[in-house]
Amino acid sequence: MDKRIFVTQPSLPPLSEFVASLQKIWDSKVLTNGGEFHQELEKALCQYLGVKYISLFNNGTIALLTALQALNIKGEVITTPYSFVATTHSLLWNGLTPVFVDIDPETLNLDPRKIEAAITDKTTAIMPVHCYGRPCDVERIGQIAKQNGLKVIYDAAHAFGVQVGGESLLNFGDLSALSFHATKVFNTFEGGAIISNTPEMKQRIDHLKNFGFTDEVTVVEAGINGKMSEVNAALGLLQLSRMDQNLKERLEIATRYRSGLSAVKGIRIPTLDEGVVGNDSYFPIFVENDFYLDRDALYERLKAQNIYSRRYFYPLISDFPMYKDLPSASKANLSVAANAASQVLCLPIYPGLTTAEQDRVINAILPQ
Ligand code: T4K
């Protein structure tokens, strides 16, 4: 049987380089609470990403939870059902009511044409997701938010390094939350971050992620422990030095998949708008009705050949038990998202996936 191929595999630096960093941590005995590696990684990431302020976190979910706290979000928040469940769980954990709005079939993100109809007098924010690192319509969402006095918190878990018109996608909205989980383009084993625009907001977030402490004896907020450890930050610095090469390899894989699959009847591969620099964090294909198999049959067919694709994001978040009874979770309200969830398959993509392995994936999809 051929070697198993998973949807992703984390990139890692040579162990010897990491051991050298670990030695420094062992020598200094500074393990966490904003040590040297933490500070250095924040600086390096601001520069690499082209953002003003970043606060590192222990994971993307706690970053989302904290972003909502930092902006004092209350009441109802408009969001997408087509995402990883952490997006909406962050709302429930803050006692907020998610209001699902359907997605745009091209961007696969919140459809701005449908947002305004979902705004009520309880709405205080919009939480869109740049799904697969594909940019939301940030201009239109920004206008709607401004006209209606709403905050915008982007779940940018997939959007590391993505640019629109030469600018970081992370600079749009009030805050953007990133994930540095093992399965992400930039990983620190576990990790995350919030991008903010002012020194005051960064400071508030930094207090919130440290229990609300502002000094040894003063607690100003009911904060949480969201701090990234020195071990994760040290790894992040090593990972960052390889990012350009990693993104190049991802692009090469995406290009090979495109050329091998774009002429296949019934397989739709979404493209990026002009002016967008993507990160190829995922490679979603949509299995349409005129393909010779349905999506689940193709998923099983790949699995039988030891290729573990994933149905990100099926089921829709709005179908999970804690959300399904919300009025906005109705199937009729979310038909575009439901269709995408029933057709999507994310193919393996990660640096180190060989061309022979890529061809195995392509050949397993081609009609036999
Ligand atoms: N918002 C969005 C939009 C997100 O996508 C996510 C996370 C978040 C928020 C929350 O961020 P974090 O709190 O996680 O930082 C994975 C990840 O666990 C999750 O981080 C990610 N989104 C989600 C889309 O995917 P699973 O359950 O699919 O992961 P798992 O363990 O099945 O891994 C997939 C494949 O990756 C495995 O088959 C093998 C490979 N793998 C995985 C891990 C963890 C490895 O080779 N090594 C590893 O260490 O959720």
Image (cartoon, rainbow, N blue to C red):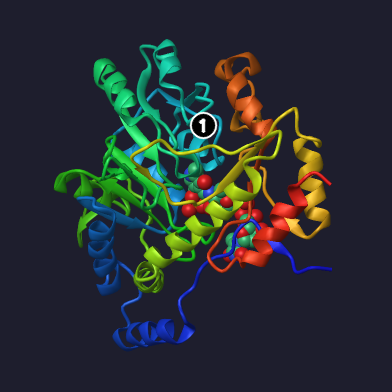
Q: Tell me the crowding category of disc 1: few under 14, some 14 to 19, or many 20 or more residues within 10 angstroms, Cα based.
A: many
Q: Is residue 172 left or right of residue 238?
A: left
Q: Is residue 86 left or right of residue 319?
A: left
User: Residue at left 36%, top 60%?
Assistant: 227
| Residue 187 visible at all | no
Vertical arrangement, residue 146 with respect to residue 12, above or below: above
Q: Is residue 107 left or right of residue 291?
A: left
Residue 318's image quarter? top right
- Front residue of 338/164: it is 164
Determine the secondary structure under disc 1: loop
User: Residue at left 38%, top 27%?
Assistant: 126
Residue 333's image quarter? top right
Residue behind mark 1: 108
Amino acid carrying mark 1 in the image? Leu
- Front residue of 297/193: it is 297
Residue 81's image quarter? top right
Task: Locate residue 254, reporting x and y percent.
Answer: 54, 52
User: Residue at left 32%, top 85%?
Assistant: 24
Residue reaching furthest left?
199
| Residue 207 visible at all | yes
Task: Locate residue 204, reporting x and y percent.
Answer: 22, 47
- Front residue of 246/179: it is 246
Task: Locate residue 301, reporting x and y percent.
Answer: 82, 49
User: Residue at left 29%, top 54%?
Assistant: 49
- Ligand 1 falls in quadrant: bottom right
